[in-house]
Amino acid sequence: MTFCQKFKFYTIKTIDQLPQYKLLSDETKQSIQVVGHVLPFRVNNYVAEKLINWQDLENDPIFKLTFMQKDMLSEHHYEKMNEAIENKLNTPSDIQGIASEIRAELNPHPANQLEANVPSLNNFAIPGLQHKYRETALVFPSQGQQCHSYCTFCFRWAQFVGDPSLKFATDQAKSFVAYLREHKEITDVLITGGDPMFMNAKTLALYVEPLLEKEMSHIQNIRIGSKSLSFWPRKYVNEPDTPNILALFKKIVDSGKHLAFMAHVNHWKEINTEVCHQAIENIRQTGAQIRTQSPVLKHINDDPEVWIKMWSEQVRLGMIPYYMFVERDTGPKHYFGLSLERALEIYQLAIRNVSGLARTVRGPSMSTTVGKVCVESISKINDEKIFVLSFLQARNPELVKTSFFAKYDPSAQWLDDLRPAFGEEFPHI
């Protein structure tokens, strides 16, 4: 087999070195520079060479998934940033200050994740750990706060812009391990980022192996959230560290834990290469399960046929379709966001046209402050048109699988846009 042989990535500082750069229009080049000063931009050679159709960029979903478009900033923010860059009197520090002002207006930490989720041990907050739900904790390794390429829609974009005040990470392994040992109600640990699979096996093991100790018998499931399967699948096929990564996965499974590789796949084109198929097979041979998830995104996958093909192909390759999310209210939400009504329509049309094996997908789901809220249907009760909503997960476990109702609003894109139906209040923590 011959696969892409060397990892190389491009940022706004080096994008002109990308071989395909000459194919970009001047307007696109300017958009990358302007928007890339506010939101993070990085693309690697695998994505550029294997996933993007450079002859039809206007319609290519992976190009829009990885390359900045002008409309990803509001007109006001775009002009403000463009003027700052073009003003020769501005220093890099001046430009950075203007970028920071714009970022502060883009809701860098949705769902109160910094205030609502960070736990304490002995009256000290534990950086880089979130105890979001009773049985689930999230670990953010500091070495994993990078990605092989950055998704333009990313709801954790604030992790990658170089601002320490917006970063959420830990390298204090003893702190999060001590917390997990004390909290026996936690059964699931999600190692996330960024992308923890940007780390090598030795570094990843520093976060994983403590979870395999006898004192951690209450930890039953280890999840690893990653985009690497589609953006750098060679990591699991023929890199020097590949045997070590796969051996670590097998060690987790052999210890009696369930390992779930949470693959972020936004379009079927991402899993359409030979090297990706081999990576999927190699991961599955370790005993790990691969579950897939994605938000529904305007310009990327806002077509039921894309989801039908993607879910069907995932099942054929041995993966488990898991979540369809609603794009979070952060960053370029105005560019990618769809109405809840349209998101539900896409989900329903897709789920009705796949095998029962693909109907494991929950959605469309909003990750809100209170919990994961699923849009179940649009109905009419007592002549009032409503959204039927339910909790897939909640900070208050008593709310899980309970339903509530919101007034129908065809323009609503998030829970905050909705109003309770029948004169009631929405559930709260």
Image (tube, helix red, strand yellow):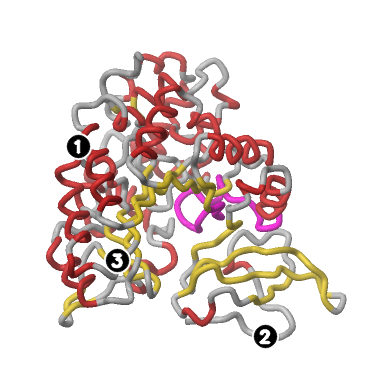
Distance CA(mark 2)–CA(mark 1): 55 Å
Q: Residue at x 49, y 63 (%)?
A: 367
Q: Secondary structure at mark 2?
A: loop
Q: Residue at x 28, y 18 (%)?
A: 5
Amino acid type at image mark 2: Glu
Q: Is residue 261 above or below residue 221?
A: above
Q: Secondary structure at mark 1?
A: helix
Residue 411, image quadrant:
bottom right
Q: Residue at x 26, y 20 (%)?
A: 6
Residue bounds of the magenta highlight: 323-341
Distance CA(mark 3)–CA(mark 2): 38 Å
Between 54 and 172, the residue placed more toward the observer is 172
On the picture, is 28 further left or further right than 135?
right
What residue would you read off at disc 2?
424
Q: Earlier in the sequence, mark 2 or mark 1?
A: 1
Q: Is residue 325 magenta?
A: yes
What residue would you read off at disc 3?
219
Residue 281, image quadrant:
top left
Amino acid type at image mark 3: Ile
How packed mark 2 is, by other alpha carbons closer than 10 Å (few <14, some 14-19, many 20 or more), is few
What residue would you read off at disc 1?
244
